[in-house]
Image (cartoon, helix red, strand yellow):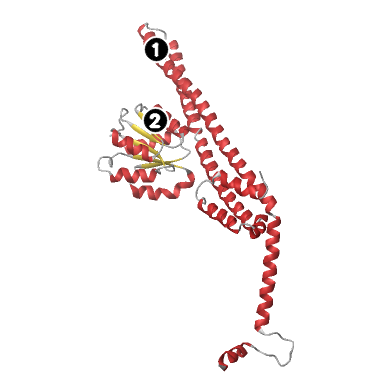
Amino acid sequence: MAQPRAAAQSHVVRNEDDPEEKTPDTKLYEELGELARFIDTTMKTLSEFSAPVNASTEQLPQAQSHLLNLKTQTEQGTHRVMLEVEAIQDNHTKISTMLKEMTLALQQAKSSPAVLAQVSALGQTLGQDDKRLLDIMTALSFQDLVAQSVNKLVTILDEVEHKLLQLVVVFGPYQKQAAKTDQSKASEMLKQLEATKNTSMDQDLADEILKQFGFN
Amino acid sequence: MPADPNMKILVVDDMSTMRRIVKNILKQLGFNNLEEAENGQEALTKLKADTYGFVVSDWNMPVMMGIDMLRAIRADESLKKIPVLMVTAEAQKENLMEAVQAGVSNYVVKPFTAETMQDKINKIFK
């Protein structure tokens, strides 16, 4: 029976020169108390951030919408340019056929070499422009790279929105109300947020969370 | 053996702009029998339903990625000999080894030119 007491005493290291020195247990309690106060202060500070966090979270879907709109607009613009390029390419094909027929007719009519050279030069110029049109067409592949970057940004914004909403739920004023009323609501929201982690978040869930904090 | 200008070519890309660009380039290079698919899954369905001589495919696509489609083509006895040219974005260069191991015929890095496409086709059908 004397063992626990002996064990407890073994933790106490006394310094004969300093009678005020605290035992390790006392130090531990003080440090835990300090840690608790630090956590409480941090919670309060983070709670104060909930309003700006809410505002930021509310703006994120708008940012995503702007980005997707940018992708759509570049896609539509690219198709418009493509349509014109393809129309010019079709015209060039027709002109090229006509030039060949014209050259043949001129040769049969024994036309002067100068005229034939002019027709040939026209064909060459047309060929050079065909090359330019193809360069314009391939340059439009920038739209695909833009679309890929936009998709990546939308994914990142979606993740940020998830994280911010988790912060709102954990540190927001709802937590204080929830302690008195419905504690399970916050954890339910966290579960729902976690469930939508790898997918696009349901707008209803985002609205519900924001509504809890007074944002309609 | 040079590429047959009449062979049926399948262009696979989820972006309509890229499908249009690749088809335009192929048309300017003399190929007129061009079909398209929006992802690997749709491409496999089309490949099994008809005879194709060549596939030009994007890497990054929803539903089924280009690399998964390539593996499925190489695993299918009736499709495995079809040449597949993979088109990848600059940032995905590290994936090329994976494509080589999966049996890709050649690859083009975006953005590319008509000359590059012609060069790759020539190398595949030499």
Percent position of residue B72, x then y: 32, 44
Residue type beneath disc 1 = Thr
A141 or A26, which lies in front?
A26
Above or below, B122 relative to A107:
below
Residue A103, disc:
1
A79 or A115, which lies in front?
A79
Residue A90 in view, yes or no: yes
Above or below, A138 relative to A209:
above
Q: Could you tell me if the residues under marks 2 and 1 are in contact, i.e. CB atoms within 8 Å?
A: no
The image quadrant of residue A3 is bottom right
| Residue at the farthest top position | A109
Q: Is disc 1 surrounded by few (<14), some (14 to 19) or many (20+) residues within 10 Å?
A: some
- What residue appears at the point 34 percent right and 32 percent down from the top-left corner? B9
Q: Secondary structure at mark 1?
A: helix
- What residue appears at the point 38 percent right and 12 percent down from the top-left corner? A101
Question: Left or right: A188 with respect to B125?
Answer: right
Q: Is disc 2 surrounded by few (<14), some (14 to 19) or many (20+) residues within 10 Å?
A: many
Mark 2 or mark 1, whichever is nearer to me: 2
Q: Chain of mark 2?
A: B
Residue B26, disc:
2
Q: Chain of mark 1?
A: A
